[in-house]
Amino acid sequence: MINKEEFRKKVIISAGQIFSRYGFKKTTMDEIAKALKMGKSSIYYYFKCKEEIFEAVVLYEANILRNQLTNSIKSVESPVEKLKNYVFVRMKAFEKLSNYYNAIFDKNLDHFDFIERIRSKYDREELAMLRLIMYHGARMKVFNVANSEYTALAVQTALKGLEVPLFWKKREVNIEERLNGILDVLFNGILKK
């Protein structure tokens, strides 16, 4: 007898690869069933519809991202290194977690209620992590941050501004170079000292 959670995870991982390749709209339940080498009825026993599978895939990828970000922050002590790790892990993870990225940014998926819930939760969690890094850096007198809330919001806005040029154009872009550039401006500003 197959474990229910193991089967759900198998469906989520397999469907995630298909959604990644074809997008939500073009993916069918038939393709998901075929990839799993089982009948659609077996999948319908665990998931009511394609949307429910997509939601599970997006939440699965969101959890992967959250764990990677948390580990990247915890792995270093310096606030500067924490922020650098956060930025690099975040931007590189979006490249790999395409379903989560699409759910967060694809306006064609706006009509799903769960997408808006995921977007809101993602924004809140990201702001909380960035605020913590800013607060930690200010307390250690490494960052000159008057208000960790506003600074976290500014960093989040800058990172979001990089997403479209980095990932939607799918052209050869040196991600490392761009991220180092934004970090340089963030840490050193543009004013001559």
Image: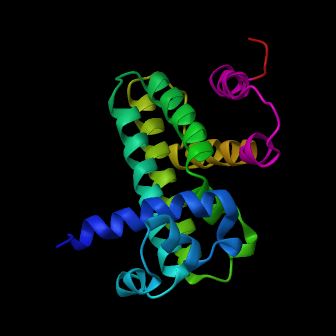
Q: On the picture, is 25 further left or further right than 66? A: right
Tell me which corner region of the image, top left, top right, bottom left or bottom right, holds residue 123.
bottom right
**Which residue shows up at 26% across the image and 69% down it?**
5
**Which residue shows up at 48% across the image and 37% down it?**
134
Q: On the picture, is 103 further left or further right than 118? A: right
Tell me which corner region of the image, top left, top right, bottom left or bottom right, holds residue 11.
bottom left
**Which residue shows up at 44% across the image and 80% down it?**
39
Q: Which residues are magenta?
A: 163-189
Picture quarter with the N terminus: bottom left
Q: Position of residue 57 (x, y in %)?
A: 48, 65
Examine the rendering and report whether any part of residue 145 can be seen.
no
Q: Position of residue 186 (x, y in %)?
A: 66, 28
Vertical placement of 72 versus 161: above or below? above
Examine the rendering and report whether any part of residue 180 can be seen.
yes
Vertical placement of 183 versus 36: above or below? above
Vertical placement of 57 versus 30: above or below? above
